[in-house]
């Protein structure tokens, strides 16, 4: 919120109060994802950097996927124009959100259906995730490896690696959903303890843990 708007709220609270009440009421019949995507578009139209970052974060926390955000931007092309869309994408790239990485988007569009995935033969390989020294002790880190989102918890020389997708309906849990060592799925608010992978709220199914090991200072995961 700008200094000018803060000033007006203090100087004329009765006037601005009606305005904010109006804004709140206008979106009461929209689901949170749609409401926040519309707010994202308005911030792009006004080219408000801080506002765009704020509402993009809200949209992702409410369960919007990166592809849905990009679709919203492209669908608004007649109103925004290419210049403003490029402005928004430049900010997204500057924010370094893992879900927007090209390889992650490719995996999301090519993901097999549950039936196909169940029928696929069990196969995998060891994949190089990152340098183990780059993982802070006692913390959870979200990263991407070959298009797959991962959460890694480090406890001294022990590493727990989890798939970033919620076991409920496969929603990809973003980095913004992480608070300390607790992950909250933005779609139905299932919560997980990243130290153990256990579901601690709403559901019962734990995160999918991947086999991992450290070899010559590199954390490897198998899938």
Image (spheres, helix red, strand yellow):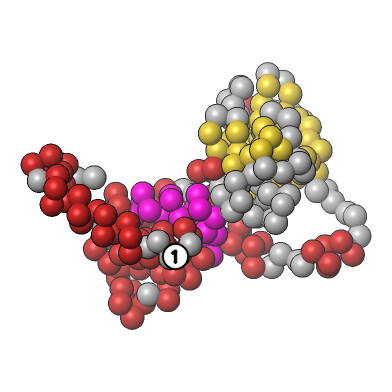
Looking at the image, residue 40 sits to the left or right of residue 46; the answer is right
Query: Dividing the image into 4 quarters, which one contains the N terminus?
Result: top left
Q: Which residue has dot 1 on it?
A: 30
Judge whether 12 appears above or below 77 on screen.
above
Majority secondary structure in the magenta region: helix
Dividing the picture into quadrants, the one containing residue 83 is bottom left
Q: Considering only vertical position in the picture, is 32 above or below 9? A: below
Residue at the spot x=76%, y=66% of the render? 112
Looking at the image, which is closer to me, 204 or 100?
204
Q: Is residue 11 visible?
A: yes
- Vertical placement of residue 66 versus 156, above or below: below
**Left/right of residue 6 with respect to residue 42 in the rendered view:** left
Residue at the image point whose x is 64% and y is 55% from the top: 171
Disc 1 secondary structure class: loop
> Residue 27 location in percent, x, y?
37, 63
Q: Can residue 59 be found in the magenta stretch?
A: yes
Magenta range is 52-67
Residue sitting at the far bottom: 78
Q: Residue at x 66, y 62 (%)?
A: 107
Out of 133 and 112, give the one closest to the viewer.
112
Q: Is residue 210 above or below residue 69?
A: above
- Residue 206 image point, x, y percent: 76, 40
């Amino acid at each position: 919120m700008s200094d000018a708007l803060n000033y007006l709220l203090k100087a004329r609270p009765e006037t601005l109060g009606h305005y904010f009440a109006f804004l709140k009421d206008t979106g009461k019949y929209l689901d949170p994802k749609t409401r926040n995507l519309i707010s994202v578009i308005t911030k792009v139209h006004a080219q408000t950097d801080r506002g765009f970052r704020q509402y993009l974060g809200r949209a992702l926390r409410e369960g919007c996927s990166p592809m849905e955000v990009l679709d919203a931007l492209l669908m608004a092309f007649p109103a925004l124009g290419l210049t403003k869309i490029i402005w928004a994408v430049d900010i997204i790239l500057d924010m370094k959100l893992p879900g927007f990485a090209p390889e992650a988007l490719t995996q999301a569009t090519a993901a097999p259906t549950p039936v196909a995935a169940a029928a696929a033969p069990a196969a995998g390989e060891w994949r190089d995730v990152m340098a183990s020294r780059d993982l802070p002790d006692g913390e959870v880190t979200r990263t991407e490896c070959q298009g797959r989102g991962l959460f890694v918890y480090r406890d001294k020389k022990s590493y727990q690696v989890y798939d970033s997708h919620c076991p409920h309906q496969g929603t990809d849990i973003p980095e913004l959903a992480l608070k300390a060592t607790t992950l909250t799925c933005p779609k139905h608010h299932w919560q997980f303890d990243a130290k153990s992978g256990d579901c601690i709220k709403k559901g019962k199914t734990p995160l999918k843990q991947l086999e991992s090991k450290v070899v010559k200072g590199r954390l490897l995961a198998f899938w």
